[in-house]
Amino acid sequence: MTLIESMNLNSYDKIPWTDITSFGQQTMLKSHLFTVSWILARFCNYSCSYCWPYARSSTPDHQDLEIYLKALDSIKAQARANGFTDFHFSFSGGEPTAYKYFGEIIDHYCSDTAPDYQSIHMTTNLSPGSKWWNKWLESTKTLHRRSITASYHAEFANEQEFGDKCLQLIDNETFVTINQVMVPEMFEELYERLERFAARGINVTLKPQSDPTASYVVHGYTEDQIAKMRQGFPQKWNGEQIAQIALYDSEGTKYELDQAERFNAFGFNKFHGWECNAGYQGCVIRENEVKRSYSCHDYPLGTLDGGFELFKAPQECITYSCVSSADSKIPKRKHND
């Protein structure tokens, strides 16, 4: 039995969130895709007043290039041994473009021609100039898909120039969305700016703010603000609304959602005891540690410089709150009671 909910603005409230028994990113449900969310380092060329201390460093803290390249190859080799043949790597920081050898990492990743499908994503403040972006576009042109989450910071960036860079990337077949952490005290100001970006044809994402430990969503949102985060600005590509997430209820009915970033606005982030593919079909790297996810506060799978081992099968979820979209989009299944 299948019923795909339409992607109209008001459809997401129709999803029976308390009756969902399995879900995941559609490309991971349908293929042999392995995903990596990689925080290269905490160093950032910006020093935003609202940035949590854990999220940035004012001094470079990168590993040696050879350690990064060896880890990338090891992840692919272990994933292939588990039957995963396609890859999606997402790089963030800090600011990933601030690493002087980031281009070499990209070139190494793109040089692998074995996968039937290979894509790349990056979360960036878009601070490099056009020469840097032209090189990135050339280096990644052989990939099946490339996407960018653009983080706008008004303390350091010009709104018009930032939007121009987004449109340049979109014009070069790159999926772009502007990600905005919706600080409760600044909500209306931030929302009005996002409306201006959306009016220029740029995707925007309203992200609820998490606490300093990234364990839960902060308090202070009004009902109207929560409604806007739940329903506002569906993601589009080439003018069509997209559906990255598939959810299934206990009857097998299928629902679709544009992005996992909406989960927190609906309070859909508690999967303790569910079967989860984190660490098996995907992993995260936070500086030197390789982990199953950002949200699972257990021992890491290993380290970049000391070696690591991915899970050989799905595992039971051990965390009580899964607030990172990188974690929540990983396929999960609720155990039968």
Image (tube, helix red, strand yellow):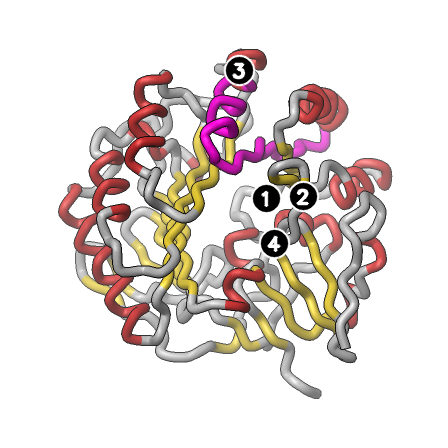
Residue beneath disc 1: 211
Left or right, 336 with reference to 11:
left
- The region drawn magenta spans 163-186
Left or right, 113 with reference to 34:
left
Residue beneath disc 3: 155
Residue beneath disc 4: 244
Q: Residues within 10 Å of mark 2 (few under 14, many from 20)?
A: some
Q: Earlier in the sequence, mark 4 or mark 2?
A: 2
Which residue shows up at 47% across the image and 77% down it? 315
Question: Please, what secondary structure does the residue beneath circle 2 have?
Answer: loop
Residue 226 point in image, percent of width and height: 79, 42
Residue 136 point in image, percent of width and height: 32, 31
What is the quadrant of residue 210 in the picture? top right
Q: Earlier in the sequence, mark 3 or mark 2?
A: 3
Q: Are marks 2 and 1 in contact (CB under 8 Å)?
A: yes
Which residue shows up at 66% across the image and 32% down it? 183
Left or right, 94 with reference to 52:
left
Q: Which residue occupies the extreme bottom position in the image?
A: 337
Q: Work out whether residue 282 or residue 173 is closer to the camera in this orientation and state it.
A: 173
